[in-house]
Image (cartoon, helix red, strand yellow):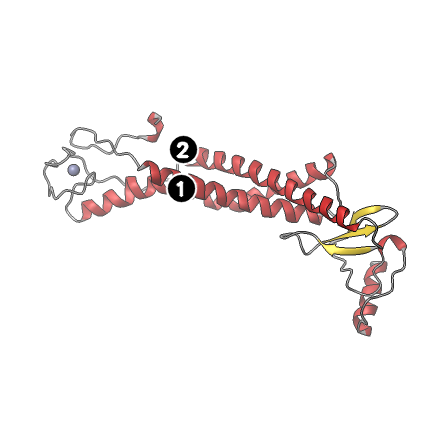
């Protein structure tokens, strides 16, 4: 346990400094949960942004762009910085303060009133409110970095495995499309027997009549209402 994990408790009247440690189980549960949450956030971001880029294959350019865009998504979770110190907030501030309000020892909870604690010897006052500090930002930075790496690597593996699966199951079949794997199932992968796998512009649904993979005409599989057909052909030409 590093000394930085154990800031001395407010020991106003100079009693023996108690070992105010946070239970190891609480530390580990918190670490795993927070890291998991951040990694899942970056995994979802990576998969979605990689599909939005509209290209297939793990080329350097595609991966670099997806990584940059995913890293930028980190800006949306900076509000979660205090989550990095939930165990400290609970075990070093909230619980001792609650014990002190009830006339008990802030450290061990023994009924001590205003004297030094006969149980653990702690004579200090309850700690003040938790404050955001550099240690919080540093802890969160580490979680953010590790979670980003975990999420982005998993996202790239997930996405490229799906692209390979699509290529493998498409061999010998006529041109067709299918959605990408969750969470990027809003975007489609297209198969062309001559050119192989390509990504469909995610904002252009192949279910709309008028969509053609690589200029090859394919008959629409279902009749489409005239209004949406007109809308899609207008969309094709683009403003
Ligand atoms: Zn005590």
SS assignment at label 2 = helix
Query: Whole-percent x and y of residue 5?
Result: 34, 30
User: Which residue in the protein does label 1 denote?
Assistant: 30
Badge nearest the viewer, 1 or 2: 1
- Could you tell me which residue is drawn at 26 percent across and 45 percent down? 95
- Could you tell me which residue is drawn at 44 percent across and 44 percent down? 33
Residue 71 visible? The answer is no
- Could you tell me which residue is drawn at 65 percent across and 49 percent down? 48
Label at residue 221: none
Q: Is residue 174 left or right of residue 186?
A: right
Which residue appears farthest toward the front when viewing the image? 172
SS assignment at label 1 = helix
Asked which quadrant contains residue 129, the reply is top left
Q: Is residue 200 left or right of residue 183?
A: right
Which of 217/49 is in front?
Answer: 217
Disc 1 and disc 2: Cα gap in Å? 16 Å
Whether disc 2's CB lies below 8 Å from ligand 1 is answered no
The quadrant of the rendering that contains the N terminus is top left
User: Which residue in the protein does label 2 denote?
Assistant: 135
- Say which label, 1 or 2, has the lower sequence index: 1
**Are dots 1 and 2 in contact, CB under 8 Å?**
no
Query: Whole-percent x and y of residue 167?
Result: 77, 46
């Amino acid at each position: 346990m590093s000394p930085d994990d154990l800031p001395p408790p407010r020991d106003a009247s100079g009693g023996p400094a108690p070992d105010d440690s946070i239970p190891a189980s609480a530390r580990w549960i918190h670490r795993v949960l927070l890291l998991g949450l951040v990694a899942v956030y970056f995994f979802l971001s990576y998969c979605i942004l990689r599909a939005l880029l509209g290209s297939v294959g793990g080329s350097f350019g595609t991966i670099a762009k997806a990584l940059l865009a995913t890293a930028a998504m980190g800006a949306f979770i900076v509000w979660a910085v205090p989550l990095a110190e939930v165990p400290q907030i609970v075990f070093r501030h909230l619980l001792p303060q609650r014990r002190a309000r009830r006339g008990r020892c802030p450290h061990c909870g023994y009924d001590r009133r205003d004297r030094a604690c006969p149980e653990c010897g702690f004579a200090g006052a309850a700690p003040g409110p938790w404050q955001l500090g550099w240690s919080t930002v540093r802890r969160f930075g580490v979680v953010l970095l590790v979670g980003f790496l975990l999420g982005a690597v998993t996202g790239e593996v997930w996405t490229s495995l799906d692209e390979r699966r699509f290529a493998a199951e498409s061999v010998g079949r006529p041109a067709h499309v299918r959605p990408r794997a969750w969470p990027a199932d809003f975007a489609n992968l297209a198969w062309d027997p001559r050119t192989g796998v390509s990504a469909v512009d995610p904002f252009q649904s192949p279910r709309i009549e008028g969509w053609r993979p690589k200029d090859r005409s394919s008959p629409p599989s279902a009749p489409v209402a005239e209004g949406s057909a007109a809308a899609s052909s207008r969309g094709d030409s683009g403003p």
